Image (cartoon, grey):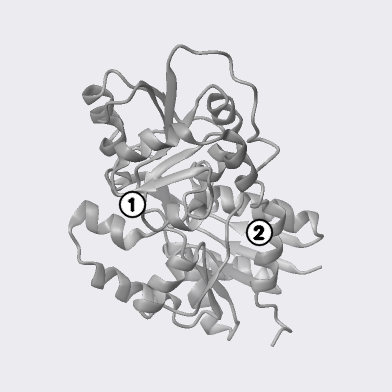
C-alpha cells in the first residue's frame, strides 16, 4: 500500500472529463488498497477563472500546499493540472528534491487561443517550463503524446481514460417517430457546437451541458432541446432514449463522453480529428468524416452492439492499473 497525493485545480463541483477521470482513478486506487488524498481548490480561498467560472483558482496556495504535503509525506505525488495548485506542488517537489508525475488532459493552449487570440507558442512555452522536470507527463492518447513531443513538452506517456460501465449501459428503447441525435458538452466556443446545432437532420437534436455560450445557443436554436447540466446517472437515462451521439469538438484530447454514449448503445458521428480518432477511430460503432453532416447520414447505418462492444474495452479498473504503474514512488528507480 502506498500513500498517493493527487493535486488538481479541476475538481468538484465542476463537471468535466478531467474531474471524472480523477474521481474514478481515486476510487479504484483505494479499492486496490492505496491511501489516496486529493488536494483541490475546495480546500483554499478561491476565485472563478476568467471566461471559465466553473473552474476555481486557489489563492495564495503555496504555503498551505507545502504544509499539507509536509504533513502527508506522500510516497507518490501526481500533479494533474497546470494551475495555481499545480504550480505550488511543482515548487514543493523541487524544493524537497521529490520525483513526481504530471498530466496534460486539456488542450488549454488551443482553448486560450480561441478565446483571446494569444499565440499557441506562448502557452506551449509555459507548458514546457511546467512539465520539464516531471518524470512523466501522462496524456490520454497517442496523438496528444505526439503533439507534446512536437512542441518539446516533457516526457509524455499514454494513460488512456475509461468509462463507468455500471452507470452507462444500454436499455431497450421505446419506439419513436423521430430519431434523436444527442451531444453532451460544456457550452463554450472551443467546443464548436454550432456545427452540430445548425445541421438539418431527420430527427430531434438534444443538448446536455451548460457554459458561457448557453444563452446564445438557446436563443439561436429554439428547435433544440437543452437539458443543462445533469449527473452521470441522469445522462445515462437520457442516452437510453436517444439513437445517435454527435461530437462536433475539434479540440478535445480524448472525449470521454464518446465512450459513455457508446456504452449506452449510441453510434457516434464526429469529425476526423485527434480525440475522436484516438477513441473510436478503429471501431465500426462510429463514423468520422471531414463533413459532420455526412457523418450524421452515415451513422444511421451502424449497429448499437458495435458501439457497446467498443466501449467495454475501456474499464476504469484497467485504466487505474495503468496509472498505478506510471506513478513514481519514493523508492522506485
Q: Identify the residue position indicated by label 1 in the image.
A: 250
Check the image and report above or below for 93 versus 245: below
User: Is residue 179 found left or right of 266 in the rendered image?
Assistant: left
**Under tag 2, what secondary structure?**
helix
Contact, CB < 8 Å: mark 1 with mark 2? Answer: no
Q: Would residue 240 be seen by someone viewing this image from the given angle?
A: yes
Could you tell me which quadrant the N terminus lies in?
bottom right
Q: Identify the residue position indicated by label 2 in the image.
A: 319
Q: Position of residue 244 (x, y in %)?
A: 47, 31
Q: Would residue 212 be seen by someone viewing this image from the given angle?
A: no
Q: Residues within 10 Å of mark 1 (few under 14, many from 20)?
A: some
User: Mark 1 to mark 2: distance in Å?
Assistant: 24 Å
Q: Residue at x 27, y 18 (%)?
A: 222
Q: Residue at x 51, y 29 (%)?
A: 230
Q: Residue at x 30, y 49 (%)?
A: 290
**Under tag 1, what secondary structure?**
loop
User: Is residue 234 found left or right of 248 in the rendered image?
Assistant: right
> Which corner quadrant of the image does residue 298 belong to?
top left
Q: Residue at x 28, y 35 (%)?
A: 213
Could you tell me which quadrant the C terminus lies in?
bottom right
Q: Residues within 10 Å of mark 2 (few under 14, many from 20)?
A: some
Q: Position of residue 189 (x, y in %)?
A: 27, 44
User: Is residue 27 found left or right of 133 in the rendered image?
Assistant: right
Amino acid at each position: 500500500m502506498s500513500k498517493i497525493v493527487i493535486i488538481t485545480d479541476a475538481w468538484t463541483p465542476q463537471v468535466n472529463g478531467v474531474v471524472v477521470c480523477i474521481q474514478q482513478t481515486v476510487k479504484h486506487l483505494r479499492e486496490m488498497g492505496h491511501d489516496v488524498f486529493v488536494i483541490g481548490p475546495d480546500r483554499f480561498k478561491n476565485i472563478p477563472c476568467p471566461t471559465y467560472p466553473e473552474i476555481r483558482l486557489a489563492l495564495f496556495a503555496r504555503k498551505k500546499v507545502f504544509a499539507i504535503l509536509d504533513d502527508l509525506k506522500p510516497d507518490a505525488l501526481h500533479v494533474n493540472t497546470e494551475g495555481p495548485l499545480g504550480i505550488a506542488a511543482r515548487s514543493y517537489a523541487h524544493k524537497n528534491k521529490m520525483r513526481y508525475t504530471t498530466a496534460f488532459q486539456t488542450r488549454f493552449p488551443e482553448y486560450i487561443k480561441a478565446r483571446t487570440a494569444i499565440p499557441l507558442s506562448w502557452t506551449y512555452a509555459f507548458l514546457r517550463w511546467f512539465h520539464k522536470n516531471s518524470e512523466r507527463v501522462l496524456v490520454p492518447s497517442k496523438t496528444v503524446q505526439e503533439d507534446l513531443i512536437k512542441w518539446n513538452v516533457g516526457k509524455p506517456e499514454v494513460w488512456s481514460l475509461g468509462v463507468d460501465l455500471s452507470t452507462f449501459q444500454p436499455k431497450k428503447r421505446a419506439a419513436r417517430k423521430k430519431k434523436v441525435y444527442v451531444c453532451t458538452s460544456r457550452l463554450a466556443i472551443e467546443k464548436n457546437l454550432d456545427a452540430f446545432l445548425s445541421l438539418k437532420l431527420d430527427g430531434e437534436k438534444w443538448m446536455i451541458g451548460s457554459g458561457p455560450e448557453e444563452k446564445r445557443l438557446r436563443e439561436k436554436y429554439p428547435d433544440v432541446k437543452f437539458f443543462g447540466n445533469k449527473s452521470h446517472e441522469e445522462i445515462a437515462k437520457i442516452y437510453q432514449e436517444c439513437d445517435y451521439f454527435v461530437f462536433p469538438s475539434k479540440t478535445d484530447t480524448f472525449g470521454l463522453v464518446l465512450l459513455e454514449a457508446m456504452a449506452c448503445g449510441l453510434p457516434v458521428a464526429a469529425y476526423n480529428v485527434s480525440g475522436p480518432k484516438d477513441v473510436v477511430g478503429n471501431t465500426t460503432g462510429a463514423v468520422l468524416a471531414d463533413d459532420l453532416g455526412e457523418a450524421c447520414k452515415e451513422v444511421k447505418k451502424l449497429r448499437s452492439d458495435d458501439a457497446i462492444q467498443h466501449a467495454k474495452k475501456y474499464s476504469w479498473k484497467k485504466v487505474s492499473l495503468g496509472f498505478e504503474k506510471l506513478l513514481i514512488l519514493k523508492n522506485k528507480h
